[in-house]
């Protein structure tokens, strides 16, 4: 589990203040340009901080694992939910996936992507029961079949790992058939 650092959320108050100052300046004046540059530097600081944090996380994942399994998320579709869009944008999933893919290729690791429609959060990783009534707001749930209490994210990660292992197993079986 990696922490979401909320780089934009932490700098949002300062950016709003600077943008308010900018709106009060005459366009094209020296003071207008000074504030515009301050805003650009603040945004650049946020972008650099995000990239650095993503590189730190991907390096940890690459160094600790030979195989990495992740869900193939529909980020564009997730951004249409206006309640979650800001948080999803701040997580920078697309950049994370792109960097992880090229580092896996660079260091010879396998990146397995599990289908986005696989019910990873809703499936009990102990008995396989699928909880169809699970909502996005439910962060924890108890399996009615086996009684196991699940944290939604950890349960999803365990299910994605087992699905990734199943995919790897089926791929190796295909390669063995092709060799014959």
Image (spheres, rainbow, N blue to C red):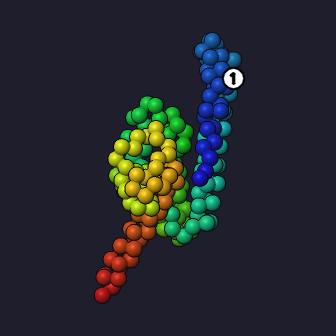
Name of the residue lying farthest toward the bottom: 180
The number of discs equals 1
Q: Considering depth in this image, is 34 or 51 the residue closer to the camera?
A: 51
Q: Considering depth in this image, is 83 or 99 the residue closer to the camera?
A: 83
Q: Is residue 98 visible?
A: no
Q: Position of residue 74 (x, y in %)?
A: 39, 46
Left or right: 22 as drawn, with respect to 75: right
Task: Judge whether 47 appears above or below 128 on screen.
Answer: above
At 31% from the left and 82% from the top, the residue drawn is 177
At 62% from the left and 60% from the top, the residue drawn is 59
Q: Position of residue 46 (x, y in %)?
A: 63, 38
Q: Quadrant of the C terminus?
A: bottom left
Q: Which residue is mark 1?
A: 34
Q: Considering depth in this image, is 179 or 159 the residue closer to the camera?
A: 159
At 69% from the left and 17% from the top, the residue drawn is 31
Q: Is residue 61 visible?
A: yes
Q: Position of residue 66 (x, y in %)?
A: 54, 70
Mark 1 Cα within 10 Å, few/some/many (few <14, many 20+)? Answer: few
Quarter residue 16 falls in: top right
Left or right: 166 as drawn, with respect to 28: left
Left or right: 131 as drawn, with respect to 2: left
């Amino acid at each position: 589990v990696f922490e979401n650092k909320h780089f934009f959320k932490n700098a949002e108050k300062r950016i709003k203040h600077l943008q308010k100052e900018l709106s009060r300046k005459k366009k094209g004046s020296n003071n207008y340009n000074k504030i515009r540059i301050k805003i650009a530097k603040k945004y650049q600081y946020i972008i650099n901080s995000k990239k650095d944090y993503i590189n730190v996380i991907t390096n940890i994942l690459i160094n600790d694992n030979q195989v990495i399994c992740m869900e193939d998320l529909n980020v564009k579709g997730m951004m249409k939910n206006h309640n979650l869009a800001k948080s999803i944008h701040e997580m920078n999933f697309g950049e994370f996936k792109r960097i992880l893919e090229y580092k896996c290729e660079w260091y010879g690791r396998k990146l397995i992507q599990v289908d986005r429609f696989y019910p990873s959060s809703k499936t009990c990783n102990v008995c396989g029961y699928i909880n169809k009534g699970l909502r996005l707001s439910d962060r924890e749930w108890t399996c009615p079949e086996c009684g196991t209490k699940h944290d939604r994210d950890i349960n999803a990660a365990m299910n994605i790992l087992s699905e990734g292992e199943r995919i790897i197993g089926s791929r190796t079986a295909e390669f063995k058939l092709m060799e014959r």
